[in-house]
Image (cartoon, rainbow, N blue to C red):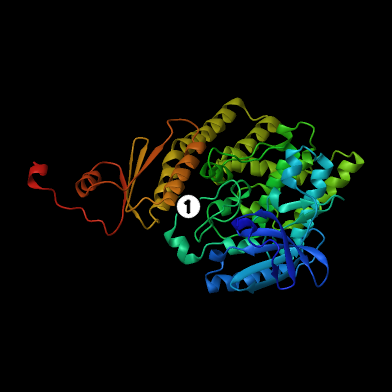
Amino acid sequence: MDEDHSMTDKTIKHYKVGELLGRGGMGVVYRAQDTKLNRPVALKMIRSELTADPDKLKRFLLEARAAASITHPAIAQVYDIDTVEDTTFIVMEFVEGQTVGALIAKKELDLLGSVEIALQVADGLAKAHKSKIIHRDIKTENIMVTPDGHAKLLDFGLAKLLEPSPEAEKTLTILEHAPTKTMPQTTAAGTIMGTTSYMSPEQARGQSLSYPSDVFSLGIVLYEMVTGELPFEGASPIDTMHAIAFEEARPVTVIRKNLPPDLHRIVARCLRKRPEDRYPEAGGLAADLKRLKTDIESGVQRSFSPSQKIDELKYWLSSTLRVGPQGLAVSALIIALAVVLIFTGIKWLVSSFWIFIVGLIIFRSIKNRKKRMLRRFVSKVAKMETVQAVRIHDDSITVVVDRAKASQYIRINSMVDAINKKLYFGRKLDVVVRDDLSGQEFQRLLRETGIQYVRDDIVLESQPEDDAS
């Protein structure tokens, strides 16, 4: 019998298993009948390899039970969690309807409908965040919309099971278990959890998650609902993760000209790279979406308040121009000087002198900017345990490592890409990560000009007499 249908027509506890509904990273889902309460339920059978570790299973059950305590109209209720004959299963509310992904594909969502769905989900998410629970895998396929227009967020809190253990994270690399566009079919410890296109930057980097991570993922869903496009896409999962971590999304108002400016502000805040720049939790997002919905229904086009304009300008300067605190200070000085010149009528000679001074400060700052960024790069790379040495010659960087892990290679290249994006002029940097140098080649490299860092345990050997002559 086909593995997917092996449970059909069987009974587990008081649940009569019916048709297969789907499969994902955690296992397969069936429609079932609760024979005690005479109601349909969704029965998720967890894959055995995910629950083989007793400690991990215990943590998962605690997390799932906490999620089951959340009651909200926008959250699919968890009814039961149990293990029978070494098979762990979860019994959830059966939700009739279509996924948001299907509605987007059929182009059945208008602006008001999209905002309403996002508002309902944000309300449910806010309730969970107050209970200190993070969803971790918000995506269009995890949001069902019932025939009467109610949104339901599925699998709440259950993605915790897919998190890698600290021990596994030390030995596995990103590419060894790279997630695909949907939840991977063969997830193992060490996977960067979440669905690639809906990850937050901190998920893409394998960092710890907090409430703003859910906000980022819901922002992607809202972006896709109102534009029909994903904000971050690449040719491969790694390219997509790089875009999420480092690239800015095109404004929704650029893709669709008739969208309200306030929608752009909300989505843009959700999709900011740093968690502290987003809504701290879903409650603030829900409040803004509620105001936006009211404006859309009443036909009001709300303009930005002065404080919102200042916030948007500060974020645009820091993320787009990338001039840093010193650059922002210099820019503020230039603006202040211009105001003085305009309104005080200072003589031309004095004005020219101050313009020259400011120009000199800007020139020196820009001239030395590349060197400063390279010093920070070397400082960060030097903290990586496997890095043996770093050499910078002209515009080429060579990083010598004990063993080139895929995750390390991606991180180093991403750091260099970030530097290149901040350069105002000059040639871009290129980087090569080497783990294939022979002992003699490595010693030769250590004697070349441009060595910026050498690990403490590396010894510079004496040159053979024939080499020294």
Circle 1 residue: 174
Quadrant where the image shows the N terminus: bottom right
Residue 149 position in % (x across, y down)? 85, 50
Residue 234 position in % (x across, y down)? 56, 39
Residue 309 seen: no
The residue lying at 41 percent from left, 44 percent from top is 374
Residue 37 position in % (x across, y down)? 83, 71
Would you place residue 447 above or below residue 135 in this image? Answer: above
For the residue pair 69 and 464, the one nearer the viewer reads as 69
Q: Residues within 10 Å of mark 1 (few under 14, many from 20)?
A: many
Would you place residue 320 above or below residue 163 in this image? Answer: above
The residue lying at 48 percent from left, 38 percent from top is 365
The residue lying at 60 percent from left, 25 percent from top is 348
The residue lying at 59 percent from left, 64 percent from top is 161
Q: Is residue 282 left or right of residue 387?
A: right
Residue 365 seen: yes
Q: Quarter of the image holding residue 318?
A: top right
